[in-house]
Amino acid sequence: MTCWDPRIEEMSKADLQALQYKYLKTSIYRLYSFSPFYHDRMKAAGVHPDDIRSLQDIVKLPFMYKKDLRDNYPDKMFVGGQDELVRYHVSSGTTGKPTVVGYTQNDLNNWALSVARALSSVGLGRKDIIQVSYGYGLFTGGLGLHYGAERVGATVVPASVGNTERQIELIQDLKVTAICCTPSYMLHLAETSQKMGVDINKDTRLRTAVLGAEPWSEKMRNRIQEITGVKAYDIYGTSELSGPLFTECTEQNGIHIWGDLAYVEVLDPETGEQLGPGEKGELVVTMLQKEALPMVRYRVGDITSYDDSTCACGRSHVRISRISGRVDDMLIIRGINVFPSQVEHALLGVPELGEHFQIEVDRKGALDSMLVRVELKPTAFSDKIDDLISLKYKVAHVLHNSLNVAADVELVGPGTLTRFEGKAKRVVDRRNIL
């Protein structure tokens, strides 16, 4: 077993909880004093920092939601001045507005530290060459893995996304030992390799894959490992919390959440009551050391459970199980979050379109595909093929700009789509997550 920092990772539970309380108390006082948003939120909840006398008192603190980030766009929730920030990352929002996360240098240091611990826990280090095939730029995936990999002393290949045949050549030529990407892209990589006559197991040195940013199951993990001979590990994080942060260890038995950086709860999504070990519910995360955008009791929306027993690897930190779904209707398409309300917002900006639409998600080979069917307004309906083709491309362009992911478009006549009593069924997900 390899630990990046055994002193922290194998800390006794009592010492870890004492450290968590220290960080929580410090963060809450800072927010109450310097964050107008959180000061008002605490006042409304009738709670003062002095009321937090133990770690268990965290339940007294109000929740934070993704809606808060949208409503306070771009930086009204930040703590401290712009001169303290060294970076922004931006992710898509559900109503056209993105969510913006700012970082101080300490935030970036802790992010890299978290990923360094994660990569070490799956056995990666100085002798490895790690190809990062997540997107770089405003998306947090690529840069998060990049700095974590450099922190453990590995050599990094910043391949980003796409150009799969070239990526396979890089894996061969540069003797890459590990890859970081989405599970579906890993399958696509394997299929493309076979078409190229490349056997990943025999013709490359690739032995480790760190996979995340979209739902995948144990069956998909087994399939990837059987096809490629590569050991596949789950990684978890969200843009609001800093992107990729936590992974499984070599035991592949739950994702370690570094307790000195984050405190996790699993709640009943209906009542908000805390659940016990092994009980599935909504993941809620408090980031204990974030400076620019502290997150307290942030309702992530992912469904999971937790295990607070010491892992067989020796690490004492809480583990969460594989994410099994969402409490809302968010879709993840090729690693990008897509909300039906976000699609609706984009479509409503096109005057020729009606208000009825449906999203059909499927998997073509190893990659996700999305088809948006949308009704035309009666006044816009035309038998002219050229007019329809032009409008179709216009709609596809609008969706791509809003979602940051390509979607096929099908224009249908008024009254074509099924109407429902009560809540409309906007999404048909035909993917079979293996």
Image (spheres, rainbow, N blue to C red):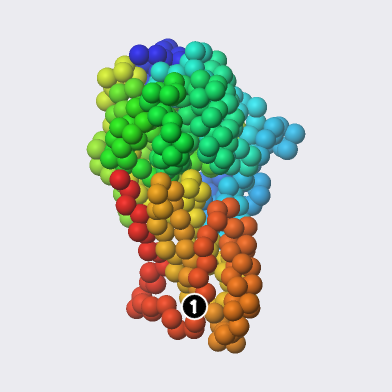
Residue that sits furthest to the right in the current view: 83
Q: Residue at x 57, y 40 (%)?
A: 163
Q: Quadrant of the C terminus?
A: top left
In the rendered image, residue 215, in percent from the top left (x then y), is placed at 38, 45
**Residue 386 appears in the figure:** yes
In the rendered image, residue 115, in percent from the top left (x then y), is placed at 50, 26
Considering the numbered disc 1 on the image, is that residue within a helix, a strand or a loop? Answer: strand
Q: Residue at x 38, y 79 (%)?
A: 419
Position of 107 relative to 101 (above/below): above
Position of 255 relative to 176 (above/below): below
Q: Residue at x 47, y 59 (%)?
A: 370
Q: What residue is pinned by disc 1? A: 412
Q: Residues within 10 Å of mark 1 (few under 14, many from 20)?
A: some
Which of the 4 image quarters holds residue 318?
top left
In the rendered image, residue 14, in percent from the top left (x then y), is placed at 34, 20
Residue 224 shown left or right of residue 134 in the figure: left
